[in-house]
Amino acid sequence: MIPRYSRPAMAAIWEPSNKFRIWYEIEAHACDALADLGVIPREAAEAVWKNGDKPYTDERIERIDAIEAETKHDVIAFLTELAEHVGDYSRFVHQGMTSSDVLDTCLGVQMSQAADILLDDVDRLLAALEKRAFETKLMPCIGRSHGIHAEPTTMGLKFARFHAEWQRNRVRLAAAREEIATCAISGAVGTFANVDPKVEEHVASKLGLTPEPVSTQVIPRDRHAQFFATLGVLASSVENLATEIRHLQRTEVREAQEYFAPGQKGSSAMPHKRNPILTENLTGLARIVRMAVVPALENVTLWHERDISHSSVERMIGPDATVTLDFALNRLVSVVDKLVVYPENMRDQLNNFGGIHDAQRVLLFLTQNDVSREDAYRIVQRNAMRVWKSFGIDPDNPDSPAQMDAVEKEAGEHENRLFFFLSKDEDLARLLNVENLSRLLDEDSISYHTKRVDSIFQRVFGRS
């Protein structure tokens, strides 16, 4: 958690001033409940609110730290400093409670606060993805599988795919927030022997939490594991989108690129460079968030009713994971919103390889015209390889220049080389009147591949 990758609102959740304020409110609300039950005088609860309800300034935090240096116990140090403000009635504070009641309930509040910010981040990312999806809905580009040209798709479908992924992520995050928003005021080993369950219910209602059914002195860490695992999934989705942009920005592709601001520099050595620094940074930040997942899973296993092996872990992964993910999501929103796309380059990529992206389209046409799938596949593949060869690429002899026959040389004069070679194929001529292939040429190839885009958009956005 460093300033370079921190946003103020999220970082403030983990500051000592916010933590101690939550601790104070837990204790004060507990005193109200205890007073209602007649366990402590009403005047004691009133004194806690009247005398203790003060900002946790640097001076107060330094005092707590000084006490902790002596007591070696953070909650006792906090209670001692609070007693200096409350006075004699402070003996009624923390009645029947244990440190974990304060620490775990506070962590539930902090993680809920963090989740609320992250949910807002996700909402803004969804809005940016939806906007760009509709802007580029029918902007054709080549689809790739294994990094290799496959069949045409659209830039809008790329954005729609990521939007659908982030819709799922929002559901996951909302569920994780609900899972983590729990309260424990159950006392030593969680039996409520020294504190009435009504105190827990009151504190929970005041802090927007739900009572933990069985806290065993600590809130079970499977809840926290789910929370951090969810953050890990979100981080992977950040990297997923960032990696797509990084690939599209490669010089030999250049179908999209991060916005490059006036005065921005890409390289200290090479003035021509425009590097995908933001999406590369997002890939790195995703790794930091995922680092929290395994320790959170390991925290689930604790000794008996409690131990503190989880405590040091959570003091670090709580701030680090949430602050880093918050920063990453906001950076990703900006990247998506400002992403520069190059439709001309996309069209060039579609047209650069002689129509081989229509191979399956031809295959299906042949099978629907009484050609067996085996024969159709063999014929189409053979002619697709000739397309590669006509570009000087011989798949059978990659170490030597392609030796082209007269037909392969002639193919260079045709925009759709695949159809050209098929029209010359003798095996195909014996199986099918090749002139029937002209029906395919009469159709716009791109329209064929994008005819279901509206249906997909309806599924994703509820509108097309």
Image (cartoon, grey):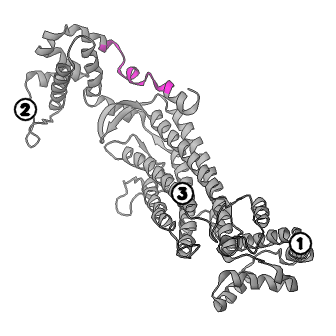
Q: Which mark is residue 403?
A: 2
Dots 3 and 2: beta carbons under 8 Å?
no
- In the rendered structure, the answer to whether residue 298 lies left or right of residue 369 reads right
Q: Amino acid at mark 1?
A: Gly
Apparent side of residue 121 relative to residue 402 in the rendered image (left or right): right
Q: Residue beneath label 1, please?
A: 38
Does the magenta stretch mainly form a helix, a strand or a loop?
helix
Look at the image and give the residue range highlighted in magenta. 440-455
The residue lying at 75 percent from left, 82 percent from top is 79
Task: Check residue 454 for magenta coloring.
Answer: yes
Amino acid type, residue under disc 3 in the picture: Gln
Cβ–Cβ below 8 Å for labels 3 and 1? Answer: no
- Residue 215 picture location, percent across and down: 64, 66
337 over 6 or under it: above or below: above
Question: What is the spatial separation of the Cα atoms under label 1 and label 2, in whole angstroms?
Answer: 97 Å
Give the mark, 1 or 2, whose residue is nearer the N terminus. 1
- Residue at point 53%, 68% (across, down): 317
Q: Is residue 108 above or below residue 71?
A: above
Query: Residue 303, relative to residue 146: is it above or below?
Result: below
